[in-house]
Amino acid sequence: MRSLLKWFSQIASVTRFGLQTLPERKGASTVAIVGIAGVVIVMVGVLSIAHGIVRMMARSATPENAIVLRSGSSSEMMSGLGGDQAKIIAEAPGVIRDADGPVASSELFVIINLPKRSTGTDANVPLRGVVPASLKIRDRFEIVEGRLFGRGLNELIVGVGALREFAGLAIGQSIEVGGEDWPIVGVFAAGGGISESEIWADAPVIQGAYRRGNSYQSVYAKLESTSAFGEFKDALTADPRISVKVQPESEFHLSQSQVMVTMIQTLGVLITVLMGLGAVFGAVNTMYNAVSSRTREIATLRALGFKSSPVVISVLLESLLLAFVGGSIGGILAFLAFDGFRAATLNFQTFSQITFAFEVSPALMVQGVFFALVMGFVGGLFPAIRAARMPVATALREM
């Protein structure tokens, strides 16, 4: 026990001496901190895009909701259902019924071109044809400005995300749909979900404008409970009149972002690793300078009987401290710069724009600090080993 306490005492003494010399090496230490902070800012910033998209998709779903597409379809764009098929789906067991009938929404999904506010370049914006039940399916839907479109009228309402990102969508303005100008009469919110990236209109009117006949692309259904999904799915997949794919709404929305999120995360990790290598070299250089400036001190301590392991640990602790400071600064700056920042990007599975907010979560900041500590450990390891292996006699001759 006494030897262990002595060992810890030696670590504390060597570490204290090292920290006391930091003001003399503030230039090199600052460079290391700034380099690590920069890596963490980039890492957290890029990954907050993927995190924001995943959270946005999660907010789009209600646990009791299910979506039905044509069998083999990976998105609404690739699906197609006839009106008779939509009725069969709506009447399936497990679907909630109210005074108006089954709470099931047969919907269309169309792409139109609109200019972005930021660049003026055209982008694919989703136009959704909905029915009255659509508003019951989406629990967090609300009109925040203007009014709902009139049934059977060439009128549009726009999501708050679409209004923010694309030009010409203010109430009173008109955009071209199916070769005619349709007025914007309202703005809606949907709890931060993907619907806020869309423009909505009456489904039968969209069918006529795009010559779709009595057809839809998806059916959303509100079920009696999450446990009713199995009965609902089994009834539809066993029905010989239709060939459909049935998914919980939450699973569907997450699958729609999978390709994009994977690409962003891969790119983020690649950029972070490349920048991290540079930061590690900066940390290595800083700690080598620290060891060189403390040659006499280390030699004296070794001559007085200090073991090599406390020297190694003290150098690593100093490197980890600099990394922690840099990582913390980087995480805080990334939060201030990116959290809540709104943007739009292309969803490669629907080839349409989605709007979302960057989300810098506490877990993401902790991940950034952890990566900073990894960089600090690697950056301090070799200088620490050099300090421990330094011959006492050689070091004393430099005094």
Image: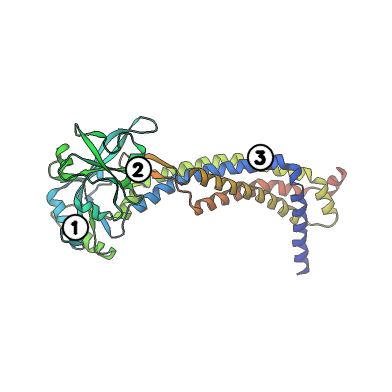
> What kind of residue is marked 3?
Val
Mark 3 and mark 1: Cα distance apart in space: 63 Å
Residue 118 sits in quarter: top left
Residue 198's disc is none
> What kind of residue is marked 1?
Leu
Find residue 386 and report its horizontal and vertical position in percent. 74, 47
Q: What kind of element bears circle 3? A: helix
> What kind of residue is marked 2?
Gly
Q: What kind of element bears circle 2? A: helix
Quadrant position of the C terminus in the picture: top right
Q: Kindly identify which residue carries mark 2.
A: 161
Q: Kindly identify which residue carries mark 3.
A: 31
Q: Kindly identify which residue carries mark 1.
A: 236
Mark 1 and mark 2: Cα distance apart in space: 34 Å
Q: What kind of element bears circle 1? A: helix
Find residue 129 and report its horizontal and vertical position in percent. 21, 44
Mark 2 and mark 3: Cα distance apart in space: 40 Å
**Residue 140 versus residue 166 in the image, above or below:** below
Q: Residue at x 17, y 58 (%)?
A: 102
Find residue 200 and report its horizontal and vertical position in percent. 24, 43
Q: Earlier in the sequence, mark 1 or mark 2?
A: 2
Q: Residues within 10 Å of mark 1 (few under 14, many from 20)?
A: many
Q: Is residue 293 left or right of residue 248?
A: right
Q: Is residue 227 left or right of residue 282?
A: left
> In this view of the protein, can residue 346 be seen by the observer?
no
Q: Is residue 120 left or right of residue 201?
A: right
Q: Earlier in the sequence, mark 3 or mark 1?
A: 3
Q: Earlier in the sequence, mark 2 or mark 3?
A: 3
How many badges with numbers are in the image? 3
Q: Nearer the viewer, mark 2 or mark 3?
A: 2
Q: Nearer the viewer, mark 1 or mark 2?
A: 2
Residue 274 sits in quarter: top right
